[in-house]
Image (spheres, rainbow, N blue to C red):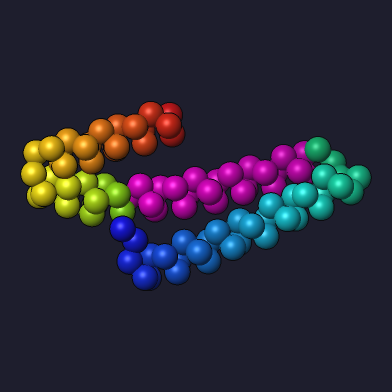
Amino acid sequence: MLDAAQQQLLVTRLNRVEGQIRGIRRMVQEPRLCVEILQQLSAAEAALNRISLAVLRTHVEQCVPSGVEQGREEGQARLKELVDIFDRFS
C-alpha cells in the first residue's frame, strides 16, 4: 500500500491532471486548433503514465516482496497480479 507521503504526492499529481482535463474540455468547447488540443491530451496522458509508473514501482518494490514473504500461495498471487498489470499496460 502507499504510504502517506506517496499518497500526497500522487494526489497532488492527480489534481494537476484533473486541471489539465478541465482545460482540455474548455479547449474542445471553444474553437481551438486540433493540434493544440492534441498537445494537451498528450501532456495529460504522459502525466497519467508517470502516476501509473509510480504506483507500479511501489507495487513491485513493496507489495510483491511482501506477498512472497507471506508464503508460496500469496507470492504467486502477487506475481500473477504483476503479470496482469503488465498485460494491461502493454
Callout count: 0
In the visual, does 59 lie left or right of 24? Answer: left
Report if residue 46 lies within the magenta region.
Answer: yes
The residue under the point 38% across, 65% down is 6
Q: Position of residue 30 (x, y in %)?
A: 89, 48
In the visual, does 39 lie left or right of 46? Answer: right
Residue numbers of the magenta segment: 35-57
Look at the picture and state if 83 lies above or below 28. above
The residue under the point 10% across, 49% down is 70
Look at the picture and state if 90 lies above or below 34. above
Look at the picture and state if 61 lies above or below 7. above
Q: Position of residue 40 (x, y in %)?
A: 69, 47
Outermost residue, right side:
31
Q: Quadrant of the C terminus?
A: top left
Outermost residue, front side:
73
Q: Position of residue 21 (x, y in %)?
A: 69, 52
In the visual, does 28 lie left or right of 46? Answer: right
In the figure, residue 36 lies in which quadrant? top right
Q: Quadrant of the N terminus?
A: bottom left
The residue under the point 29% across, 49% down is 59
The residue under the point 33% across, 66% down is 3
Q: Position of residue 11 (x, y in %)?
A: 50, 64
Classified by dominant secondary structure, the portion drawn in magenta counts as helix
In the figure, residue 83 lies in which quadrant? top left
Report if residue 64 lies within the magenta region.
Answer: no
In the visual, does 23 lie left or right of 60? Answer: right
Look at the picture and state if 50 lies above or below 89. below
